[in-house]
Image (cartoon, grey):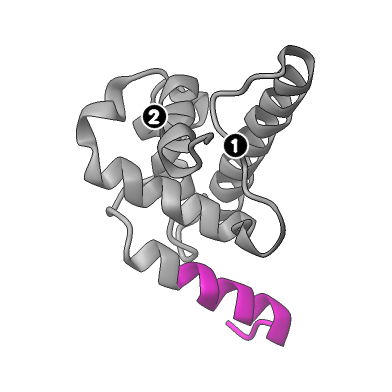
C-alpha cells in the first residue's frame, strides 16, 4: 500500500499510540458504544484493521460530542466535571484518544461502566479542576 506522505505520517503517529494500547478488536457490536470498553476498543483500532476508519471516526466523534456537550453545560452551570487544558497544554485529538485508551487499560474495572460515565471519569482524572 502506497499512501501519500501526509496520510502515511498520520498512520505512523497513530500506530505509535495504538501499539502502546491494549489489543482490542473493533467488532461491529462495539459500534453501539454501550460500555467504556466498547469506546476504548474503537479508539484502539489498529490502522490495518478493516474497520479502522469507521472505528476511529466513531471514537473521535463520540469524544468530541461529549466534550462539546460538557463545554455547553459548563458554560451554563459555571461548573464542570473536568477542566480542559488550553494553549500549549492542550493535547491533540490523537493524544487525548491515546490517553483515554491507556487509562482504560490501566483501570479495567471501568470497562463495564456506561461509556459516557467512563469517559467523564477519565477526563476528570486527566484534567481535574483546581
Q: How many marks?
A: 2
Mark 2 = which residue?
36
Whether residue 63 is in magenta: the answer is no
**Picture residue at 34% right of the left edge, 67% below the top:** 19
Q: Is residue 4 visible?
A: no
Q: Residue at x 78, y 22 (%)?
A: 75
The residue under the point 41% across, 18% down is: 114
Placement of 35 over or under 20, stated as above or below: above
Whether residue 76 is visible, yes or no, is: yes
Tell me where residue 33 appears, x and y as whole percent.
48, 26
Number of the label disc, if any, that sits on residue 83: 1
Name the residue nearer the viewer: 109 or 129.
129
- In space, the residues marked 1 and 2 are separated at their CA atoms by 20 Å
- The local crowd at label 1, few if under 14, some if 14 to 19, many if 20 or more residues have their Cα within 10 Å, is some
Instruction: Pick whichever, 127 or 105, lies toward us.
Output: 127
User: Considering only order in the chain, which callout, 2 or 1, is on the residue closer to the N terminus?
Assistant: 2
Please give the range of residues in magenta.
1-15
Instruction: Label 2, secondary structure: give it.
Output: helix
Amino acid at each position: 500500500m502506497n499512501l501519500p506522505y501526509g496520510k502515511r505520517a498520520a498512520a505512523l503517529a497513530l500506530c505509535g499510540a495504538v501499539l502502546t494500547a491494549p489489543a482490542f478488536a473493533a467488532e461491529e457490536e462495539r459500534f453501539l458504544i454501550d460500555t467504556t470498553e466498547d469506546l476504548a476498543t474503537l479508539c484502539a483500532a489498529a490502522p490495518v484493521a478493516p474497520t479502522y476508519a469507521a472505528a476511529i471516526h466513531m471514537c473521535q466523534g463520540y469524544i468530541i460530542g461529549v466534550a462539546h456537550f460538557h463545554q455547553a453545560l459548563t458554560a451554563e452551570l459555571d461548573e464542570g466535571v473536568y477542566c480542559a487544558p488550553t494553549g500549549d497544554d492542550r493535547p491533540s485529538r490523537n493524544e487525548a484518544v491515546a490517553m483515554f485508551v491507556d487509562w482504560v487499560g490501566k483501570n479495567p474495572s471501568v470497562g463495564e461502566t456506561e461509556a459516557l460515565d467512563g469517559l467523564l471519569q477519565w477526563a476528570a482524572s486527566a484534567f481535574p479542576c483546581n
